[in-house]
Amino acid sequence: MSKLQHCRIVSRETIRNILFIFFILYLGNVFAQQEAIDSLETKIEKYIASKPKTYRDSIYVDMLLEISIKYEFYRADSLLSISKKVIEISDAINYPKGTYQGLNNIGYYHSNLGENHEAINYFKKVLDLGAVMNNDMVKIYALNDLGMEYTFVGDIENALKHFLKGLDVIDIENKEHLGMYSTLNGNIGELYARQGDYKTADSFYQKVLRNDRQRGDEVNTAKNLSTHAAILSKLGEYEKAMFNINRSIAVFEENKEYSWLAYAYGVKGSVYQHQKKYQWALYWYGQSETVHKNLEDNRSQIDLKNAIATAHLELNQDSEALSYANDAYNIAQKLNSLKGSMNAAKILFEINKKRKEYKNALAYHEEFQKISDSLSQDGVKKSLSLLKTKIAYDQQKKNLIETNEKKLAKQRSLIYISTIILTILLATLIPLYINQKRLRYLNNQLTKSTANLERRRAELNELNRTKDKLFSIIGHDLRGPIGALQGALKLFTSGELDKDDFLNFVPKLKTDVDHTLFTLNNLLTWGHSQMNGTKTRPKVTSIGNLVDNNINLLNELAAAKSIKIVNQLPEKSVALIDQDQIDLVLRNLISNAIKFTPKNGLITIGAQSNKNNWQIMVKDTGVGIDKKTIENIFDDVKTTSTYGTNNEKGTGLGLSLCHEMVINNGGEIWVESVPKSGSTFFFTVQKVEQKLKKAS
């Protein structure tokens, strides 16, 4: 058994049970194939509906080609009609890819019906189109297809010639060509196998499999392993053959390569048959036959049915052998397969002789002898032709190389003369070029120096601005509260302020100290980020815990104004954030909400789960913010400090810091507000599960 690329005895009851299991699996594969076809048909219908007037485009052609591939061994007539439609549309819209693939499909259609000369005509058209397109891959595929068709009709000389031409077009450095490099070498090896030269065929497949291992193409490797297994079986290397075919079957089953799976099952059966394990051979032939029932691939069934007939004959099951041999003979006659007809006639002769039906036996024996003599003479001619073709081809290559060498010698003379002229020109031009290059270098250096000066000036301005901002905050926002505290302590220690009066000042002093500490923390964080930049170290953190901690920290300030703070965050609000940075963001937003919310107000903290992030919300019932202030609210250049509803003083740094920290954590921050109705600050942080999904 062959396919060009395009144990112990068990009981019958056991075989029937195993066959039933495989039949169920086969039905599953058939349904999967039909489901895939139905899905593609639905896809095409939706596309036509979405573009009723302009759907005849390259996208529509590609969809038709995709579904036509599914039809090759299932609905041959559909393959033909769709391919004709593809060619018609592709020619109309000038889409060469659709044209050559449509021609290819029609070639396969005729090939599968045994109409090899028709197939050859179509593959020649593809080859011509590949030359016009200057597309090497199209030419390589066409040369391979032509080689296969010439093999089918027994024209070994032309088959080898086209395979070798295909190898000449291949560029080994081009990864796209390596798959066809394996295919062409494998098909040449198959030609030798057909002549009975299995050792030479084996050497070709060793080269093919080395190339496949380098490429890592699992499916193509499996195809070559299955064909190599058939050759190894002929050489008597049954253990290696069985190892190869089992690897191939696993790949074909996983990738739903049904035509190759049918072939591989048949090869496995033939390995058992060569070992005279006929029950196991029939079992695997049965698997191949089951898959073939849903494939329109008659050529492959000739060898399969002859093999099944032979196995039945060896087991003295003459009726079964007769049925399969007749089927093989009829298909071979229809497809003009001489070798298939000869093998079937030999089996029919043996069966009829065994049944003492000598008239039929004699007729089949004469048929067998006639074809055998023809093939024997043909075999000698083809073997010689194979050798002559290879020698002639090598001679043509040698002549071509010699011709090219002569042309190169002439070109070298011209190159020498050109070199002398070029040297004279270079002697003149090089000094000019060097001066020009030096001038360009000096200009570049000047440009870089100017850019560096501008950058340093900008950095200096930024440092001055930062310094001014820093001293302004220290002078105005920190000195006042600390000075008030110092004055109260001085009056108390000097006796001018008694204990009771001092204690009356303590709540106010504590509030001033808390505000001063909060301001100092913001100031240090801001100053550090301005001077050195901020490093963000994200880790998995519960936002709910951060909110609870800040509510506990600021609850006393809120209670002083009878403000209620409500935490509405979901229990499992977990994010990938820098805990310290987002903690600072929450503290500033909640502190601001307290600052600008009058007595008996309400502050609500919540979170909304989006696809990629958490959207955190801090909402208050405070005084709100006007539109002009909102425009500059996160700008650290234009911020100004404002007083709260209880005259709480701020630095204007808080929201600038919030903006910087949220951006550092990959989020966004914004505000929505209506004056006198309250404000809502939003910011986003990345969800943990989305990050983990990307990492996996």
Image (cartoon, rainbow, N blue to C red):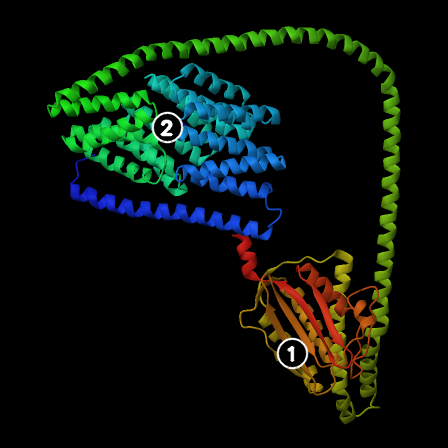
Secondary structure state at the residue bearing disc 2: loop
Q: In this view, does 620 lie to the left or right of 451?
A: left
Q: Hey, what amino acid is under mark 2?
A: Lys
Query: Which comes before the other along the chain, label 2 or label 1?
Result: 2
Graded by Cα atoms within 10 Å as few (under 14), some (14 to 19) or many (20 or more), the crowding at tag 2 reads some
Q: Which numbered disc, 2 or 1, marks the residue closer to the eye? A: 2
- Nearest the eye: 3 or 41: 41
Among the 4 quarters of the image, the one containing residue 673:
bottom right
Q: Hey, what amino acid is under mark 1?
A: Thr
Secondary structure state at the residue bearing disc 1: strand
Q: Which residue is drawn at 56% across and 73% down?
A: 570
Q: In this view, does 381 lie to the left or right of 660?
A: left
What residue sits right under mark 2 in the picture? Answer: 3
Mark yes or no: residue 277 visible. no
Q: Is residue 576 above or below residue 93?
A: below
- Counting from the top left corner in percent of width and height, residue 133 is at 61, 27
Q: Which residue is drawn at 10% across and 23% down?
A: 356
Q: Residue 370 carries which label?
A: none
Mark yes or no: residue 219 visible. yes
- Nearest the eye: 256 or 639: 256
Q: Do the residues labelled 2 and 1 touch (CB within 8 Å)?
A: no
- How far apart are the alpha carbons under marks 2 and 1? 74 Å
Q: Is residue 599 left or right of residue 300?
A: right
Q: Is residue 45 above or below residue 389?
A: below
What residue sits right under mark 1 in the picture? Answer: 604
